[in-house]
Image (cartoon, coloured by chain):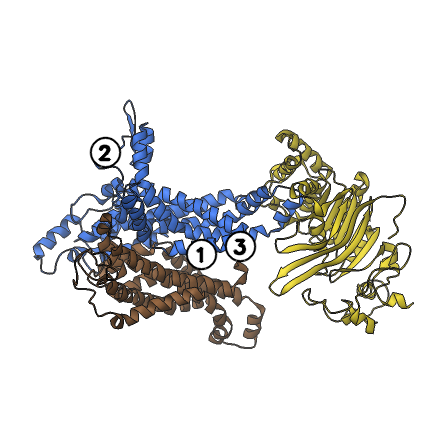
Amino acid sequence: MIVGIVIVAVVVALSLLAPVLTNVNPVYTTGPPNAAPSSQHILGTDLYGRDMFSRILWGGRFLLVVGVLAVIICMAVGVPIGLAASYTGGIVGRVVTLIMDSIYAFPSLVFSLLIVLIFGSNVFNYALAIAVVYIPSYYRVVRSQTLAIKELPYVDAARSVGAGYFSVIRKYIWPNIIPSVIVVATINFADAILITAGLDFIGVGDLTKPDWGVDLYYGRTTILSGAWWTIGFSGLMILLTALGFSLISEGYSERTNPKLK
Amino acid sequence: MIQGETSETLLQVKNLSVEYVTTEGAAKAVNDVSLDLRKGETLGIVGESGSGKTTLGLALMGILPPNARRSGGTVTFGSSELTTLKEDKLRAVRGKRIAMIFQDPMTSLNPVKKIGDHFVEYFRAHEQETSREEALSKTTEVLRGLGISAERLNDYPHQFSGGMRQRVMIGLALALNPELIIADEPTTALDVIVEAQILELLKILKRKYSLSLILITHNMGIVAETADRVAVMYAGKIAEIGPALEVFGSPKHPYTQALLQSIPTVEGERRTLKVIPGFPPRLTEQPPGCSFHPRCPYAFDRCKVEDPVLIPTSAEGKAACHLLEKK
Amino acid sequence: MIMILLTVVFIIIRVIPGNPVLLHFEKNTSPALIASYSHILGLDKPLYVQYFEYLGGLLQGQLGLSMVTFEPVGSQIAARFPATLELTFYAFIVAVVVGIVLGALGARKRGSVVDGTVKVTGILLYAWPVFFLGMILQLIFGVYLRWLPTGGRLCPGCAVPAGLTIGSFHLQTGLYTLDSILALNPGEFIDSISHLILPSVALGLVISGVFIRITRTNMLETLRADYVTAARARGLKGRTVTYGYALRNALLPVVTVMGLQFALLLSGAILTETEFNIDGLGRYLVDRVAFLDYTAIQGAVVFLAIVISIIALLVDVLYAYIDPRVRL
């Protein structure tokens, strides 16, 4: 898990410090196209002659912001719905679960594709699309925990002395779902990165922004002539970021659930 | 231990120790245990949960879980020293000469395997030349002997009742005519009526096939009924061992005494339930000296320092308690 | 469940932005042009009429008309689906085999370096962007080593495998590997397989990450089960017990997950097909996106939803069949 945190911290730092670390513009041509790494362009240039190094530094921002937004939306929507529906139970619970299950099975990439295509490719739409498809995951996790806890004797005891709806949720259920929610949230982040990069790779969205996924879109054809640097580093960054979050998720879940070791 | 001249010793355990590797250090589940089993006898091993009796059973067969290891001692069965055998020779012994019956028959049978296939696989593992038909007919015979009709060969474990499942387990244990059966809590998962049936069945089969039986349990009642000799275990060590009548009639070790007193009875006057104060020690942090001393009503200075060894208390009985030397 | 998905898709494409034809064209196209397009595509009728017509059409296998070419979307999809099917099929095999083998390996050697490697590999593979892995494979095997082709399904200029012809009976599935077997043409078979290796491996490896994890986790549990100890007590061979008892029971829950993974496979197929220039459903979708051909996009997405639902159903049935506790 620590490794994951370190990786993520580095990536975030790089993205935040981009303006400090380089003064080369990632969007304009600053060198010969498809130039191999050299002392002038440490990581080479892409097919338009843009400096790869600065593109790497700048390329994470969009993805990270999408990730953050997606996770926030998901948590803000998924967790309360999960709590309410599971705790209330009955028909409401079943109907909501049915809807959630239907969405759960749907491939997130396809859905996000639709949304971004129709509504525009700004950060918020990406985040929203990813969030919608991911909410069921949060819902499920919250639901299974809530159902388990709600039946426990000490909850009954609390209710019998008059604890209200919200205070039961707050005191008993909430603390127990936090670990699971964190695990889902970190995986959510990783997936958000992958999906957003994937959509950029397909060509949906704004291709002028410096973005690792966009790099791969442009790099597709150039690698066939051996210009590996046009995609190598960008792809690596996507991988590292997703990997970092996944490791955090794994590590954290192992810590809170040692059986899995 | 003075061996009876008339019957031979089938199993000899000398200074056996088994450790579990845990995050808090090594836990000695079985601590320097020695005992003998004579041919045709039933030895009961009793103790609380965590006393090491199940681990002892598994160690005898050499099927300890991956995080446990035998840290010392030997097990001699007949003329073979099991502890030095290589795995493939040991496998030939397991199931064929020594068999084991487990506590929960539901979880001890492979849920995706038909009952018949359990047997067939078993037969063919030990006698390679057996064809499937031969194995099946043997299986039918065994099942019939247990009162299970041959039609049920193709059923799965979850389709049987608890009592029948345990009979299947017994059938599996007996199928290759072993000399020794180790039964680990064979009736704990069953209700009382079925328990009585199973115990009766074990007695009959034991006589019929001249089996030796090691009965591991925490239920003193069934040990009193079925065992010839009894070993009482506490915290991985043997506290007392001897003929059942002696151990139950005049227990020498304070732990045995306390155990017997804590059994609720229907007869006699009403009294409050006597419990042994305190808890069994954590196996990673055993107290110095006698493991039982923190809970023993008779403990004195020597008990806190020196670990007692088994001393003969009669012709056939032994107990590990410093009190015995005082007398 | 399918209904919900369909309706959602329909709503998104038809209802919210209004007339999708408007989306398709630039802002200041003549209203007359828009009107005529709408009419041809049947988009000028009231919404609820459109919805029911659409559903009715679906039942007959109609998926609407492409905005760009006015061809039926259905036939366009039918021409391309076999490519996707082939790809996902082989990728699935790769994923399952790699997943189970590695997962079982990790569980058997729990706690060791091997196990640690397996765990990390599982996470790493799943986090790996499929298109990136595809590119790396293309670079290494296609460009540097020149062992395998980098794209397409057949060599340029090669004929499409003809399938089987007996008298007047003709069977051509569109699955090139199958068709070449049916036509008894080893050359074609090798050609189509060699084109499939890289994309299947890329997609399969990424999906295998999940399988590695769950196989390992489940097997860790089953290895400690009572029936395993009991089987060992009967003197059964270690290998028999590990595979026949522990692994077999560990795999049961894995089957339930397979249905979900199929959705992932399809998503991945979209990316993989784009990467490797395979003319399948995924690529079709991406192309239509570039053309803003909304009816085609809707058709493709709906088709995907249906396929996913069918697979999910099949997986449920399959699970009931292999778990005797559920079956009886």
For disc 1, the neighbor class at 10 Å (few under 14, some 14 to 19, many from 20) is: some
Residue B42: x, y in percent? 81, 48
- Residue type of the residue flagged with mark 2: Cys
Number of the label disc, if any, that sits on residue B233: none
Ranked by sequence position, the earlier of labels 1 and 2 is: 1
Residue under the image location 91 percent in, 55 percent down: B315
Circle 2 chain: C
The secondary element bearing badge 1 is classed as helix
> Residue B217 placed where, x, y %?
74, 55
The local secondary structure at tag 3 comes to loop
Residue found at x 11% / y 60%: C27
Task: Name the residue carrying label 1.
Answer: C120
Q: Which amino acid type is marked by label 1?
A: Val
Give the label on residue C158, or none: 2
Label 2: which secondary element: loop
Mark 3 and mark 1, same subunit? Answer: yes
Q: Amino acid at mark 3?
A: Ser
Chain depicted in brown = A
